[in-house]
Structure formats: structure tokens, C-alpha cells
Image: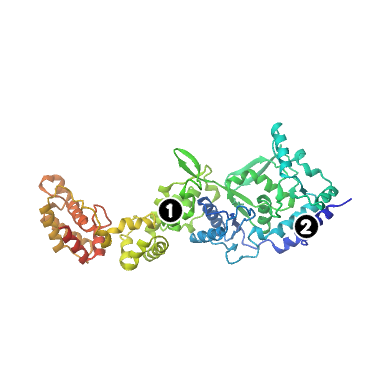
Amino acid sequence: MATYNDLAELLFPEITKTIEDLEKEYPERSLPEGAQVTRFAPSPTGFLHTGSLFTAYIAYTFAKQSQGVYMFRLEDTDTKRTIAGSADELIDQLEEFGIIADEGYFANGDKGAYGPYQQSARADIYKTVIKHLILEGKAYPDFCSAEELQKIRDFQEANKILPGYYGPYARDRKLTVDEQIEKIKAGTPWVIRYKSNGDHNKKIKFKDSIRGELELADNDVDIVIMKSDGLPTYHFAHVVDDHFMRTTAVTRGEEWIPSTPIHIQLFRDLGWKAPKYAHLPVIMKLDHGNKRKLSKRKDPEAAVSYFLKAGYPARGLLVYLMSIANSNFEEWTITNKSLDVSKFTFSFKKMALDGALFDENKLNYFSKEVIAATPKEELFKAVKEWASKNSESLLKKIEMDEEYFSKIINIEKDRPNPRKDYAKYSDIEPATWFFYDEDFAKHDALPFDEKFDKDFLKAFLGEVADKQLYNATESEWWNSVKELAAANGFAVSNKDYKANPEAFKGNISAAAELIRIAVTGQKDSQNLHEVIDILGEERVKARLKSAI
Ligand code: GLU
């Protein structure tokens, strides 16, 4: 009578290592107490999803704030769905957010002692563990064809039985080793299944770092652990990889909650300690009053590239994501105006459960704060870098005169409450067009109030052109505007104006507005004193003259 050993050798003759060898090769890490080992484990099946950025960011943050290790593991066992080049794109985009792995798969080779970090390169590791399970009688080859599996399902459906390959419906579970060997030798295709010892009528409990204790039905399905292509399924690879990479905390999407009993069972049967689990909420969107998942097809904001192209600063998006992640974060931002989010202590306990809602207004709010808090030089560099990749017209303007451009985007920066004009770099051009003569020349009719007749406007603007102060402090300049206004029939004090509006052409802001319209072509603009200062005497005079 053949033994498990015969079977194991027949299935995996090339595997000579044992599970003990692997334990030695990938020893427990010596890290400071409390240090967490986390990973982001995407499949290279396309672009970086906003939800994936969230997942990666949380894993990264949790590792970093505990002086731990953050890994990037490429889950590329689904060869049919793999898209060439997408892994490197994921890494590049994460890098734009500063989410750089301590260990993991990189385009130019692995980094770290717990690799390979690409599942397709780990086949021998999985096979070593599977061979071990075969030897222990805890896994077996299954020879069912697709049609035979369908027959089992049809029978279950017709008889209203829970579907699945389990218990009495796990056909090949009952084969003897002799029968198994005979089929293998006959060349019947096989997969490897795990022999579950679970009971579906029993509950299994586990602790989720976000949701607390969860209780789910135990798994009794003999799941496939190795596919016919020799690669593992997700369930098995997760358990093996996170054990031998010595992951302490698995942060993954909540869609994995229902399969966690399978994972716990595998950890237990292999005699390994399961990591902590944190199942993250999915990012949702409000669509006509209904909550739904961000959809790759319908929502441009489902792709991280959308934000990068629009010129959201990476930190703006991270700050926003942290506000979704932790309910106490917004309060923290009030006392931490620089918005250095790396100083915030993230906690799973403060995580909302009911599906984080994507809110563009809130993103814009935080992003404006971030841009406003970015030092001048840094902002200039970031905008130029963005423009060089995304906006030819803006880049042209920047290159025309870098200092001029830097002044423009940094108007009213050096104050306790700096201006917040831009949520993203693509907002800059529409808000600063008038600084550039070529664009200014194309302005519409100047929007002066009809109550001022042409002769008056000419006279007033003429006087401004002669007497307007340049290179003056804001208060000197403002005094000169007041003088000009008073000499032309405007009220200098609001109180005077309110007491007797008929006696004046308008109040002081009405006078300033006329100047603003003449030099910017519009009624609203950034701080007029700074605008005039940046435009400079020559340009301002030319504009006033042309208005006249
Ligand atoms: N490749 C899996 C996914 O993209 C990883 C889940 C996990 O983090 O374990 O959903």
C-alpha cells in the first residue's frame, strides 16, 4: 500500500526543502517591542485605485509610526489578469505619495531578506508547504474536471443544498493514496485541495483591529490551494507569505472578511500564529442619494492618476485620506496647521466602519490648506514639476520669468492666515491669467459699473496712472488710493458713506474696484496691492492707459 510519502514525492519530486528549512531561512524578525510589520499586496491588474492608495497608506503609516517594516508584495498569481507594466506604475505612483517600501518588489529588483516579494517567484515556497501538508494528510490532489464540478453544483442547487466542495460533496477527498497515484500516473490533470476539518455549524471568532471581535461560520470547504498552473490561490499564498515574511498586521479591504475563517484555519493547522487583521472600509461615493463603491468605469476619481493629473499635491490627498481614516484627525489639524500628517498618530480604533464616503469638497478644502501651508520655494518647484508633465501652457509662463511666477502663486503667503486660492495646480492658470500680457490682451469688456460715466472713469483712471504709488508698503499704497478716491468724490470712511451715500460716488472699495478692473480685467482678484506690486509700474501704467 502506497504512503503519503510516495504521493508527496510523486507530486513534488523537485522539492527537497522542508518547512523547517523555510523557518530557518525566514526567521522571526528582531524588531523593537511593538514594531509592526505590514504590507501592501496589490495584484498588477491595472491602475492604482484610490481605495488601494488608502490601503497602502494605512499599512505604511501603521508600520512607520511603530518603527516597523512596510513591505510591497506583488500578488501576480492570476496570470490571466496581469497587465504588463502595471506593477511598476503602481510603485511609481505610490512613490509620488512618499509611500516607499522598506522591503519588497521593485522594478530594478527585490529589496529585503524575506523575498522573493513577487508571488510568481515563490512557487517553490508554496510547494514546500503543500508537500508538508500532503505528508500530514491535510491536503490532497483533486482530479475533478470542470464538468464534474458543475455536476456537483447542479445537484446541490437542485436539492437546495449549500453549494461547495465540502464533506460528502468533496468527491476526491475519499480516494486512497493508491488511487491518487494511479490517476496521477495516468496523466489526469489535478489541483491540490486543503482537507478542511472545519464544521460549518460551528462559529469561529477572531479579533479585527477595527471591528472588534467577529464571529463567522467555520469553513468546511476543501478549498483549492494550488491551481493546475502550479501557482497558489490567494487564500493559501496569503497565509504562507504573511507567515514567512513575518507580517504582524494584515490591513486589507473588508471584502476579505468572509474568507478570514479559511485563513485562520490554515494558520492553525500549520501551527502558525495568525497576524492581526484590520479590514478597512471601502471608499464609497454618494450617487443620487445612494451610497455605492467608487467604480473604475463610472468615476474618474477611482484612479489615483486623476488626482495627480489635476495637480492635487500628494500631501493634500494624504491629509484627506487620513481624515477619512480617523475621526479625530480633523480636530488634530486645527492645532497642527502645517498639516504634517506624518506626525499624527493613526489608530484603528478611531476608524469609521460604515464605508468611508468620498467627498471632493473636503478634499479640496484640505488640499487648499496644504498648498497654502507649503513654503514658497517648495510650492514653486512642485508646480513647475507638475506643469512640466501636465501643462505646456503653464510651463511656458513659468519659464518666461520664474521669479515673477513664484511671486504670483505666493501672494499673501507670509501671514498667519495665508490665501487659499488653489486646491490643485490646474487651478492656478485660470486664476492668474491676467498677469500675462498675452492673455490679458484677450480680456472681455472691462466690467465697470454702469453708474460711472466714461468721462469720469477716464479722469479717475488718468489720475491713478499719474499718482498711483509703486514699491510702497501696503499702508502707504492704501493711503495713496484713499487720497485719490477722496479727491474724486469717494467716501474714505465707510461711516461717512453710510451716513450719506448720495453725497459720494461710492465708498473706498468701489474706488479700489475701478483700479482692479482696469489692471486685472475682472472684479475679483488676489490682494490688489500685491497684484500691482508684481505687475510693476510699467505694466500697470500701460493697462490703465489702455483702459482709458
Ligand atoms: N491581492 C489582494 C488584493 O488585491 C491582497 C489582499 C491582501 O492585502 O491580503 O485584494
Mark 1, ligand 1, within 8 Å: the answer is no
Could you tell me which residue is drawn at 79 percent across and 59 percent down?
A: 13
* Residue type indicated by callout 2: Phe
Q: Position of residue 355 (x, y in %)?
A: 52, 43
In the rendering, which numbered label is found on residue 12?
A: 2
Distance from the alpha carbon under mark 2 to that under mark 1 = 57 Å
Q: Nearer the viewer, residue 450 or 408?
A: 450
Horizontal side of 193 relative to 62 (left or right) equals: right
Residue 418 visible (yes or no): no
Q: Position of residue 179 (x, y in %)?
A: 84, 47
Asked whether the beta carbons under mark 2 and mark 1 sit within 8 Å of each other, the answer is no
Q: Nearer the viewer, mark 2 or mark 1?
A: 2
Query: Which one is earlier in the sequence, the residue at label 2 or at label 1?
Result: 2
Could you tell me which residue is drawn at 50 percent across and 49 percent down?
A: 325
Q: Position of residue 336 (x, y in %)?
A: 42, 56
Q: Which residue position holds label 1?
A: 333
Circle 1 Cα neighbour tier, 10 Å, few/some/many (<14 / 14–19 / ≥20): some
Mark 2, ligand 1, within 8 Å: the answer is no
Q: Position of residue 197 (x, y in %)?
A: 75, 44
Horizontal side of 407 relative to 345 (left or right) equals: left
